Amino acid sequence: MLRSLLQVGLLALALTQGAVGSSSVLAGQQPATPPWTELAYAKNYLWLKASTSLSLSPVTAASVADTWLSPERMKPVCPGGDTLWQLRVQSQLGNSREQVSIWMDPDNLQVYQRSRISEGKQRRMKQYRLLEQGIYRVRREPLAAERGLSPELWSKSSAMQRLFPEALSASPPLLSPYALLVAVSSGPLNKLGDSWTQYLYTDVDYLRVEMAVTGVEEVAVDYRLLSGNTTREVKEPVAALVVSLQVQPVGAAPEDEFELMGLTGPVSILLDPVIGLPLQIRGTAPRMGETAIDLIRAVIPDRRATLP
């Protein structure tokens, strides 16, 4: 009952505030600490099942430095602080799976390195390292004799450097698509009209993404909320903020279509305005058409256990 009354009040507040004012924030504003440490999403469509889980944890820069790429005759950008956030993602769609690791700056969400291991008809690994003048990408595929080895030891099949376009000469923080789920939970997105601009590097493209609160919508939820030793089933409808992702290329025309969690545009995220959890991701999926992937599990720190 408490949450239901609170959601009604928030809906009225969001509509009122959206009518009288809004804020637009550029990349680089220091984000708040995300309210979650783990998220899990799932979608079943006939015979096809999709699932994605994310875990976010602090690590020391020294503990991961040995795993980072050090390309010759290039200048990688190194963290300025001792602590990083490590975002780990495991995703599956049918028989295809991927594992993603991302190391980012907690102060501005700058991604210094990420790796992606995909398995389906083929196995491959891609690594991306931030340089002073662009992004360095390495692609690895296992030879027959390497199939039992760790992906970092697979043979290098290609390597390339993608220079920054002139529009990024001011060097704003560069995120990756999955890092947007950290950004949307920790950014200044509180009411209708609020927006926050971020810049991304995908596989080969530089993109500008404006996350804009374009509506408030009641959404049905059904997920487990864990905090410390407490587990609670959350099933009451939520008056969620609709955060639309407005994507534009930076520099050359994009080679690939932007996607988040396997969904292409237009993509939107439904955000719980109380706890800050991304409750649902909407977009278009192969073989499914327009669809939504729902939150089924979330872990939040003990300090948030008293929230409704």
Image (spheres, rainbow, N blue to C red):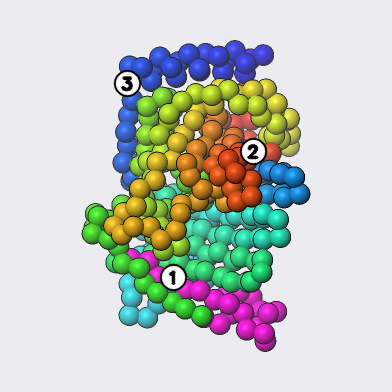
Which residue is denoted by mark 3 in the rendering? 21
Q: Using the image, determine if residue 17 lies above or below residue 261.
A: above
Q: Position of residue 60 (x, y in %)?
A: 50, 59
The amino acid at mark 3 is Gly
Q: Position of residue 246 (x, y in %)?
A: 40, 41
Q: Quadrant of the C terminus?
A: top right
Q: Earlier in the sequence, mark 1 or mark 3?
A: 3
> Residue 257 — which label?
none
Per the model, the C-alpha gap separating discs 1 and 2 is: 32 Å
The range drawn in magenta is 134-156
Q: Quadrant of residue 150?
A: bottom right
Nearest the viewer among 187 and 266 is: 266
**In the image, farthest residue toward the right:** 47
Task: Please tell me how crowded label 2 is: few (under 14), some (14-19), or many (20+) other residues with Cα within 10 Å.
Answer: many
The amino acid at mark 1 is Arg
Which residue is denoted by mark 2 in the rendering? 294
Which residue is denoted by mark 1 in the rendering? 137
Q: Using the image, determine if residue 187 lies above or below residue 236.
A: below
Res. 182 visible in picture: no
The amino acid at mark 2 is Asp
Task: Please tell me how crowded label 1 is: few (under 14), some (14-19), or many (20+) other residues with Cα within 10 Å.
Answer: many
Nearest the viewer among 60 and 120 is: 120
Q: Earlier in the sequence, mark 1 or mark 2?
A: 1
Q: Which residue occupies 55% across, 44% down?
A: 284
